[in-house]
Image: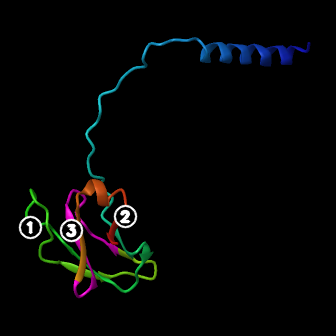
Amino acid sequence: MPKRLLIVLAVAALAIAACSSGSTSPGPSSTPVSPSPNPSITKAVVEVTVAGTPQPHIPVEASTPRNAQSPRPGTPFETLYTGKKGLAHFNHLKPSGTYCWVAIITPSFHSSECASWGIWQTSTVTLGT
């Protein structure tokens, strides 16, 4: 056998042996790190849907909660309308803040959500049905 093939076979045999060693000892554990807000993320994306279909031209109000213990929308500080894809982009938010959004889908139907930075910094806030 050529020397190169022997080396490849030896490396493969060592890899197989390492994978099937049957060791049951756990790997090193790490202490969970408490998450913190990302100071560079100051934008939230809010999507408004009805029956799963994105809704354009829907007013969405942004506010801070009236009460941190029982978050409910407070007085709006900004109102944006959703675009063609049913999205509204709220900029210049405080990275550690909790915000509430209210979509006024019809005069008698509003959808709201309050979210901490852990939600709005990492995902799209969805309103509607």
Report helix, strand or loop for mark 1.
loop
Q: Quadrant of the C terminus?
A: bottom left
Q: Is residue 104 above or below residue 98?
A: below
Real-space Cα distance between discs 1 and 3?
Answer: 10 Å
Vertical placement of residue 10 versus 71, above or below = above
Element at label 3:
strand
In the rendering, at what x and y percent does residue 63 appear?
18, 72
Q: Is residue 71 left or right of residue 81?
A: left
Q: For residue 79, which quarter of the picture?
A: bottom left
- Among numbered discs 3 and 2, the one appearing first in the sequence: 3
Q: Residue at x 36, y 23 (%)?
A: 29
Q: What is the C-alpha distance between the residues marked 3 and 2?
A: 13 Å
Q: Amino acid at mark 1?
A: Arg
Q: Which residue is mark 3?
A: 100
Label 2 near label 3: C-beta < 8 Å? no
Where does the N terminus fall, quadrant-wise? Answer: top right
Question: Which residue is label 1 attached to?
Answer: 66
Q: From what the image shows, is residue 67 above or below residue 57?
A: above
Percent from the top left, x then y, of residue 2?
91, 15
The quarter holding residue 113 reads bottom left
Mark 2: which amino acid? Thr
- What secondary structure is marked by label 2? loop
Residue 14 occupies which quadrant of the picture?
A: top right
**Structural crowding at the residue carrying mark 1, measured as other residues with C-alpha within 10 Å and reported as few (<14), some (14–19) or many (≥20):** few
Q: Say which residue appears at 9% left-offset and 56% top-offset.
A: 69
- Give the residues in magenta: 89-108
Q: Are marks 2 and 1 in contact (CB under 8 Å)?
A: no
**Alpha carbons under labels 2 and 1: distance apart:** 22 Å
Q: Which residue position is annotated with label 2?
A: 124
